[in-house]
Each structure stands twice: as structure tokens, then as C-alpha cells.
Image (tube, rainbow, N blue to C red):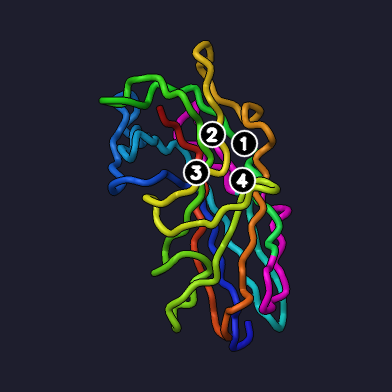
Amino acid sequence: MTRIALFALLLGVLASCGGPSMIDRRSPNNPNIPQQVDQDAVVVIAVASFEVNVNPAELYATSKVVNITLSPNTQFSIDTTAFVVPTPANELLSFGNLTVNVAFTNQLKLCGTGGHQKCTKALLQMYTSGVAGAGFWNTVDGYGAPMTAGLAGELQTINLSQASAVTLESWTIPSNRNTLRLSDFTPAPVFLVSGDFTDAGEGAYSTTINVALALSL
């Protein structure tokens, strides 16, 4: 590493949308599984992460695909192979994309009062955390370079905190379905990630990006 590290980027998976603080409840069938997050009836069911470090003088990246199983019947992971570390510059920078490559659950009755009602929507959401503001955050100077992400042609500004998570893709669960699979999301969940560094000053920027598989009514 040189004295100036432009980015220190930690990516993760976890999400929800607007509302009060997260409430972690445990499933009566498996106490190790967070059952319901009472946040506008959104239930988060999986988490994964990877790290990327960029040095403006000597570019390098280390990444890993993380598969996390929260229960025997809920699986979720992201593929970071196409996540590209850009050359630092004062312009709109593309970080390539993140691909959800595993998504499965047979636990759809997690919504409503008590978390026993069948959910009607599956959501893929994103938000940032771990720093004081949204985007790629400059801690020393207290501002962020805006981040956008989403399907091609549908990029959205990514906000800070679980309460402001952005839904990047959703699927309406048919009444005759009892499972959720990756193939249910159409188009395939390949999310482009960009950072607007056109007005970014010299210094280090960092954030934690969280992507979640969630359910709602």
C-alpha cells in the first residue's frame, strides 16, 4: 500500500427497507435463524460479504465468494468475479457488477403478525453501513461520493442504513408456490455498481455495501 489509498471497500449482504430499527426475532423451529425483522413487514433471511482494496499507485484486488447458509433450507451467495476495481479518477467510475448466484428458501411463512403468514414478495435490496454517510465515504472530510447500483438501465442511488435500503429487484410469489429460487428473479440479478467521484477530493474513501434477500407481504 502507498500513503494514499483511494478506496477501502467492504461489501456485504443484508437488507431491509424504510421503517423503525431492526428487531431480531428467533424462529421457534430453529433458534439460530433470525425469523422476522419487523420493518415495514420486511423479513431478512440471508447474508454474505467480500472485500476489495484499491491503491491508486499499485492496483490490486482481493475478493472471495462467500456462501452463508442460515438454515438447512435457506441459501444465498454473491459472485464477485465481475466486480472490477477502477483506476481512481475524478469521474463516474464503474465497479463492474455483483451477481446473485445462489438464492433459495423453502421458508415463506415468515410475514405478518407473529411471523407465520405466507409472504407475497421476494426482494433483493441494497444499502450502505459502517460509516457516517451514504456513498463511498471520506471520513476525514465528512462527505461521500454518491453510489448507484441496480439492473442495467435501472440504477438507483444507494442510501445509508437498513431503514433506507433500496429494492433493486423483486418477485411476486404465486399462491401455489412454497419455495423461492434464483431462477424466479427475471432478469437475472446482475447489479451494476458505480461511484460518482467527479467532485471527490484527494483522500481515502470507504463503505460497507449490504445486499439482502428479503421477504415481505
**Helix, strand, or loop for circle 1?**
strand
Residue type, numbered disc 3: Ala
Sooner in the amino-acid sequence: mark 1 or mark 4: 4
Residue pictured at 40% horizontal, 20% vertical: 118
Residue identified by numbered label 4: 78
**Helix, strand, or loop for circle 3?**
strand
Sooner in the amino-acid sequence: mark 3 or mark 1: 1
Sooner in the amino-acid sequence: mark 3 or mark 2: 2
Mark-to-mark CA distance, 2 and 1:
7 Å
Marks 2 and 1 close (CB-CB < 8 Å):
yes
| Picture layout, residue 169 above or below residue 27 | below
Q: Which mark is residue 75?
A: 2
| Picture layout, residue 85 above or below residue 48 | below
Residue type, numbered disc 1: Val
| Picture layout, residue 134 above or below residue 104 | below
**Helix, strand, or loop for circle 2?**
strand
In depth, the one of 195 and 106 nearer the eye is 195
Residue identified by numbered label 1: 102
Q: Is residue 85 magenta?
A: yes
- Figure quadrant of the C terminus: top left
Residue type, numbered disc 4: Ile
Mark-to-mark CA distance, 1 and 4:
7 Å
Residue type, numbered disc 2: Gln
204 with respect to 109 (left or right): right
Mark-to-mark CA distance, 2 and 4:
11 Å
Residue identified by numbered label 3: 212
Residue pictured at 37% horizontal, 46% vertical: 18
